[in-house]
Amino acid sequence: MKCRSSSARNFCFAMLTLLLSAYSGVSFAAPGQCGKNFSWMVDEGSLFKSTGVFPLKRQEALLDQRCSFLIVGDQPSAQYAGWWAMKARSIKSISTIEADAANGNVQALVYDPEVWSFTPVLEQQHPAEATCAAANVAHAHGKLLVAAPGIDLARVLNPRGASQSGQYVAFTQSGVAGPIAKCADIYEIQAQSLEGDAKAFQSFVSTIALQARAANPHIVIMVGLSTNPPGVSGLTPQTLLDAVKAVAGVTDGFWLNIPSPGALCPNCGPSNPALAQQLLEQLPTSSN
């Protein structure tokens, strides 16, 4: 079953509901209860920093849904404690996964291997094997595993291709999306740096989603969006809306990034939470 239509998305998320309930008794809503059948994943720390521009009440109204994910840090803010969204932890290396998997306050783990100091070189070289190891730990603790591999892994997996054709083409050629998706519950496609070109965005997302679903017919697909991705400027709410529409028939949801320049995103532009709110205000919302 491919999760492309709204009915198929409901089926796939229902399967996740059964999976998670079997593991931990936690309720996970089908995306039919979400605006426009999309699940959202957002970072609590980014949202907290944005409250001066993106008010907390609007954040809650637009993002807090049972079928969505709130990535929390070591000290979650009390302001988000009552949200319906499933709590998740971001993992950069499987060396740290055990402690987060044992955390009874989270329902999902987001494994995010990239070419950076936070992910060991061995995991960069073997992201599929590392993802499967992460999934084994996550599932043993009753958690969902979200795989979110960085596209820059192409520089390690297919260096010649990355040098000749760019990392997006090289990542596609590497074929690694399939083996990664095989072990994961959810695959997040980090396509945000292409969001300024809806055609390129749609092409890449569709190709990677096809690879992932070929390996795992029940995989749930999410796609990265960003208010200020590296190397991209001049984004508008319409730009992001066009990107959303371009992949609406392919994805089940989006990871909406509102990054600030720093160690995790050294080349990002200034944080732009207003753009996130402006996008979300244009999309239908629904009750929890």
Image (tube, rainbow, N blue to C red):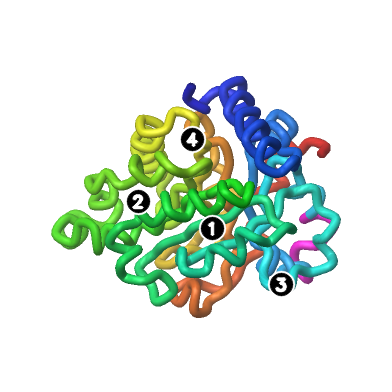
Residue 162: percent from left, percent from top: 21, 59
Task: Provide the residue designation for mark 3.
Answer: 49
Q: Is residue 71 shown above or below 284?
A: below
CA–CA distance between discs 2 and 3?
Answer: 33 Å
Residue holding disc 2: 128
Label whose residue precedes the other's in the sequence (2 or 1): 2
For marks 4 and 2, the one nearer the N-term is 2
The residue range painted magenta reads 52-59
The answer to whether the residue labelled 3 contacts the one labelled 1, judged by CB atoms less than 8 Å apart, is: no
Q: Say whether residue 132 is left or right of residue 52.
A: left
What residue is shown at x 56% (from left), y 52% (from top)?
Answer: 138
- Residue at left offset 43%, top offset 43%: 183
Where, by quadrant of the figure, is residue 173 drawn? top left
Q: Earlier in the sequence, mark 1 or mark 4?
A: 4
Does residue 244 appear in the picture of this structure? yes
Q: Amino acid at mark 2?
A: Ala
Image depth: mark 2 or mark 3 in front: 2
Sort mark 4 into few (<14), some (14-19) or many (20+) by Cα contacts within 10 Å: many
Asked whether the residues under the numbered discs 2 and 1 touch, taking CB atoms below 8 Å apart as contact, a structural biologist would say no
Q: How far from the left and from the top, in percent, is residue 88?
A: 65, 56
Please tell me whether residue 79 is drawn above or below residue 172 in the rendered image: below
Residue 226: image tag: 1
The residue nearer to you, when weighing 140 against 272, is 140
Q: Which residue is mark 4?
A: 219
Position in image of residue 100 (x %, y %): 61, 63
Label 3 vs 1, first from the N-terminus: 3
Spatial CA distance of label 3 from label 1 is: 16 Å
- Category of crowding for the residue at label 3, using alpha-carbon neighbours closer than 10 angstroms: few (below 14), some (14–19), many (at least 20): some
Tell whether position 54 is magenta.
Answer: yes
Local packing at callout 2 (Cα closer than 10 Å; few below 14, some 14-19, many 20+) is many
